[in-house]
Image (tube, rainbow, N blue to C red):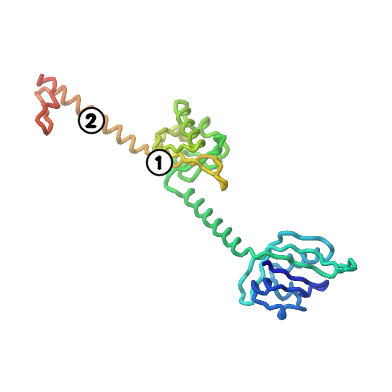
């Protein structure tokens, strides 16, 4: 169930099995006696395939060489080739045997994975939220554009540096480290608030979700933190609290009796003048 072909010392096909015929669309009678490289290999791979076959004709094996074979209909079939010298009963080198594997679907799957990975990389890098990553030692290995924008620190400035020790203020180091350590142990933390300080020393309030990062084998490889800049929200909350406190003082010290009742008629406000 693998394409197998043979060539003589002049590079002409003298072996072409059913699988080779099946995947290329060329029957055995169509290829026997014809120059394999010149007639069935695409121009950009002629030189490299010729080198592999020439090496085999010199007695050197080549394993896992990838190249495309083109079908009769013009479709590229990706082949993983092992080329071996062919020796006759007298020990004389008489050609090359190539045993291949059709890896077209595998290559397509790899290309799709690469595309998805590239799309994900772009999504992370351009997301409208600060995203960072650390390795198991706590060193930064991911830092997107938004993280760079809100902190004033570029990716180059933070990659490989200890996130907690170098970029978190001393009073929050223990709590941030605890969140990251939990994520390294598989425990997700959501909506954790802490301040990041910009390169210029400005405080940025961040709402953080910390998630365990795993490799292809399921092993913990680090942490991904997705944040939200809540500096303006926190400032608005503080302003609202200040206004509420000022209003409370105004009511309590007003030079007029002021009282309030709830919907059940029970007193819930009684200022100093009312007293």
The residue that mark 1 highlights is: 228
In the drawing, does residue 271 fall left or right of residue 111? left
Q: Secondary structure at mark 2?
A: helix
Residue closest to the far bottom: 29
Nearer the observer, 126 or 47: 47
Nearer the observer, 154 or 69: 69
* Mark 2 neighbour density, 10 Å: few (under 14) some (14–19) many (20 or more): few
Residue closest to the far right: 90
Residues under numbered marks 2 and 1 in contact, where contact means CB atoms less than 8 Å apart: no
Which of the two discs, 2 and 1, sits closer to the camera? Answer: 1
Nearer the observer, 148 or 172: 172
In primary-sequence order, the first of circles 2 and 1 is 1
- Which x, y percent locates residue 77? 63, 68
- Which x, y percent locates residue 16? 73, 73
In the drawing, does residue 239 fall left or right of residue 47? left
Tell me which residue sits at (48%, 48%) in the image: 124
Picture layout, residue 132 above or below residue 30:
above
Q: CA distance from mark 2 to mark 1?
A: 26 Å
Picture layout, residue 2 above or below residue 193:
below
Tell me which residue sits at (37%, 37%) in the image: 231
Nearer the observer, 145 or 172: 172
- Name which quarter of the figure residue 252 lies in: top left
Q: Secondary structure at mark 1?
A: strand
- The numbered disc on residue 244 is 2
* Mark 1 neighbour density, 10 Å: few (under 14) some (14–19) many (20 or more): some
- Which x, y percent locates residue 242? 26, 29
Quarter of the rendering occupied by the N terminus = bottom right
Question: From this viewpoint, is residue 148 visible?
Answer: no
Quarter of the rendering occupied by the C terminus = top left
Tell me which residue sits at (68%, 66%) in the image: 2
- Name which quarter of the figure residue 27 lies in: bottom right
């Amino acid at each position: 169930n693998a394409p197998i072909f043979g060539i003589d010392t002049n590079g002409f096909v003298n072996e072409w099995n059913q699988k080779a015929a099946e995947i290329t669309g060329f029957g055995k009678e169509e290829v026997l006696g014809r120059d394999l490289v010149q007639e069935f290999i695409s121009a950009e791979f002629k030189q490299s395939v010729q080198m592999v076959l020439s090496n085999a004709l010199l007695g050197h094996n080549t394993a896992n060489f990838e190249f495309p074979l083109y079908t009769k209909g013009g479709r590229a079939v990706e082949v993983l080739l092992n080329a071996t010298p062919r020796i006759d009963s007298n020990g004389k080198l008489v050609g090359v045997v190539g045993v291949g594997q059709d890896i077209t679907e595998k290559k397509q799957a790899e290309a799709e994975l690469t595309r998805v990975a590239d799309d994900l990389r772009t999504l992370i890098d351009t997301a409208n939220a600060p995203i960072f990553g650390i390795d198991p030692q706590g060193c930064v290995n991911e830092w997107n554009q938004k993280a760079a924008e809100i902190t004033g620190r570029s990716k180059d400035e933070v990659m490989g540096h200890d996130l907690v020790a170098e970029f978190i203020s001393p009073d929050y180091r223990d709590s941030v480290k605890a969140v990251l350590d939990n994520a390294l142990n598989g425990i997700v933390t959501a909506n954790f608030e802490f301040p990041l300080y910009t390169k210029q020393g400005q405080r940025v309030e961040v709402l953080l979700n910390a998630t365990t990062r795993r490799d292809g084998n399921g092993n913990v490889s680090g942490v991904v933190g997705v944040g939200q800049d809540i500096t303006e929200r926190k400032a608005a909350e503080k302003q609202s609290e200040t206004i509420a406190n000022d209003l409370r003082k105004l009511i309590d010290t007003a030079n007029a009796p002021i009282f309030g009742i709830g919907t059940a008629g029970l007193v819930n406000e009684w200022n100093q003048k009312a007293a």
